Image (tube, rainbow, N blue to C red):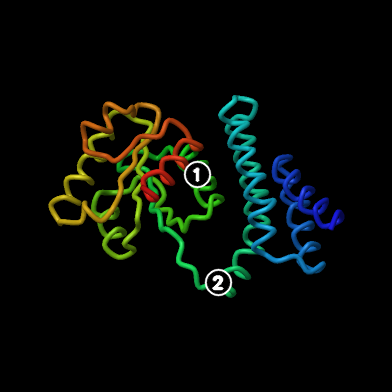
């Protein structure tokens, strides 16, 4: 058992150290040794990425480090995820995320995405410069529990309110929680446009999603 724990800890450290090649090698080795894919995900990949998020919050890691660590996380996640899906019938909470129309800055959104996925949510990424129509279409088809919108440009914030108004118009608002974030966004703005919450950073976004979906 001590050897198993050591291997899991090595995978966690490889994520934190931003080593995608080592992460993939260790995950494959762990699987060959008989470790369950779910255990690898829950006990090392997710803890590794959560620690990266905490380092980012404490300003010990910055955007480049988080993005490299994300690559390491996905190097392992992409190996175990298909195995977990084939074994599990559990339905995960779905989250749709995207950067609003007119904004092509998506680094912050990408960091939020990986931490949400690392926390066990089923996430659909619409990308950047997403129109109100695309948000509404995705919500209509996918029926997520949460819609997360972001923007780094003050001039595009109006589109967040447009999406919420359209959800209300189509009588879809009651069935979905809407959260917003980005540099020009604050809690006062979120309240004014009728969002369910505001997250200052990626770790706060994960905590907020847990809070509003669990109740």
**Residue corresponding to mark 2:** 88
Q: Work out whether residue 24 or residue 89 is closer to the camera in this orientation and state it.
A: 89
Q: Position of residue 196 (x, y in %)?
A: 29, 41
The label nearer to you, 2 versus 1, is: 2
State how many labels appear.
Answer: 2
Q: Residue furthest left?
A: 169
| Image quarter of residue 70 | top right
Mark 2 burial class by Cα count in 10 Å: few <14, some 14-19, many 20+: few
| Image quarter of residue 160 | top left
What whole-number distance in Å separates the C-alpha atoms at marks 2 and 1?
26 Å
**192 relative to 180 in the view: left or right:** left
Q: Position of residue 114 (x, y in %)?
A: 54, 47
**Residue corresponding to mark 1:** 110
The residue positioned 82% from the left and 67% from the top of the image is 33
Mark 1 burial class by Cα count in 10 Å: few <14, some 14-19, many 20+: many
Q: Work out whether residue 155 or residue 2 is closer to the camera in this orientation and state it.
A: 2
Looking at the rendered structure, the secondary structure element under dot 1 is: helix
Looking at the rendered structure, the secondary structure element under dot 2 is: loop
Q: Work out whether residue 105 or residue 87 is closer to the camera in this orientation and state it.
A: 87
The residue positioned 23% from the left and 35% from the top of the image is 158
Q: Position of residue 206 (x, y in %)?
A: 47, 43
Label number found at residue 123 = none
Q: Position of residue 61 (x, y in %)?
A: 63, 30
The correct choice, above or below, for 52 with respect to 126 in the image is: above
Q: Residue furthest right?
A: 3
The correct choice, above or below, for 46 with respect to 25 in the image is: above
Q: Choose the circle earlier in sequence order: 2 or 1.
A: 2
The residue positioned 49% from the left and 47% from the top of the image is 113
- Given contact means CB atoms under 8 Å apart, are the residues at marks 2 and 1 in contact? no
The residue positioned 33% from the left and 27% from the top of the image is 186
Q: Quadrant of the N terminus?
A: bottom right
**208 relative to 1 in the view: left or right:** left
């Amino acid at each position: 058992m001590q050897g198993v724990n050591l291997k899991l800890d090595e995978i966690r450290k490889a994520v934190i150290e931003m080593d995608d090649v080592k992460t993939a090698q260790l995950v494959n080795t762990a699987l060959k040794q008989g470790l369950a894919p779910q255990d690898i995900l829950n006990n090392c990949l997710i803890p590794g990425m959560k620690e990266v998020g905490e380092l980012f919050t404490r300003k010990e890691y910055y955007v480049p480090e988080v993005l490299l660590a994300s690559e390491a996380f996905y190097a392992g996640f992409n190996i175990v995820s298909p195995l977990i899906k084939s074994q599990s019938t559990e339905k995960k909470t779905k989250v749709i995320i995207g950067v609003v129309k007119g904004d092509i800055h998506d680094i912050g959104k990408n960091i939020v995405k990986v931490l949400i996925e690392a926390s066990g949510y089923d996430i659909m990424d619409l990308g950047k410069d997403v129109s109100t129509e695309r948000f509404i279409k995705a919500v209509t088809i996918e029926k997520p529990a949460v819609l997360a919108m972001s923007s780094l440009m003050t001039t595009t914030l109006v589109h967040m309110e447009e999406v919420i108004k359209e959800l209300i118009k189509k009588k879809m608002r009651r069935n979905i929680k809407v959260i917003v974030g980005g540099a020009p966004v604050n809690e006062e703005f979120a309240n004014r446009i009728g969002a369910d919450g505001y997250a200052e950073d990626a770790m706060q976004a994960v905590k907020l999603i847990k809070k509003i979906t669990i109740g």
